[in-house]
Amino acid sequence: MDYIEILGLVAAILTTAAYVPQVYKTWKVKSTKDISLFMYLVLLTGVLLWLVYGFYIDSLPIILANCITAFLVLFVLIMKLKYK
C-alpha cells in the first residue's frame, strides 16, 4: 500500500467518523426536528455516486468511506422519517 492510499484511508476515516456524533445523538434523543431531510437526501445521493465512482476506479478508501457513510446517512434518514 502506497502513501497516497494511506492518505486516502486516513481522510476516509476522518470524514466518515464526522457523522458518528450526529447518528449517536439522533439515536439517543430520538429527535430529528433540526435535521434537514432535503440535505440528507442530497448527501445520500452524492455518497452513492461516490461509491459507484470508487468501484469504477477500484479505490478501497473511497469504497469503504462511502459504504459506511451511506449506512450512517440512511440511519439518520430512517430516524428522521420515524421521529417526525
Image (cartoon, rainbow, N blue to C red):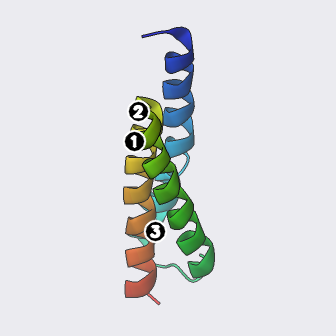
Write the residue at 62% across / 72% down: 39
Label number found at residue 4: none
Write the residue at 37% across / 85% down: 82
What amino acid type is highlighted by mark number 3?
Thr
Judge whether 84 appears above or below 38 on screen: below
Label number found at residue 55: 1
Q: Which one is in front, 4 or 18?
A: 4
Distance of mark 2 from mark 3, alpha carbons? 33 Å
Distance of mark 2 from mark 1, alpha carbons? 5 Å
Image location (x, y in percent) of residue 25: 48, 63
What amino acid type is highlighted by mark number 1?
Phe
Distance of mark 1 from mark 3, alpha carbons? 30 Å
Mark 2 and 1 residues: CB-CB less than 8 Å, in contact?
yes
Judge whether 26 appears above or below 31 on screen: above
Q: Quadrant of residue 27?
A: bottom left
Of pointers 1 and 3, the one earlier in the residue sequence: 3
Judge whether 37 appears above or below 69 on screen: below
Q: Which one is in front, 36 or 30?
A: 36
Image location (x, y in percent) of residue 73: 46, 63
Label number found at residue 58: 2
Write the residue at 49% across / 42% down: 17
| Residue placed under numbered mark 3 in the picture | 26
Residue 1 as seen in the image, left or right of residue 35: left
For the view shown, which residue lies furthest in the front direction?
56
Q: Quadrant of residue 33?
A: bottom right
Residue 4 as seen in the image, left or right of residue 1: right
Pair 1/3: label in front:
1
Mark 2 neighbour density, 10 Å: few (under 14) some (14–19) many (20 or more)? few
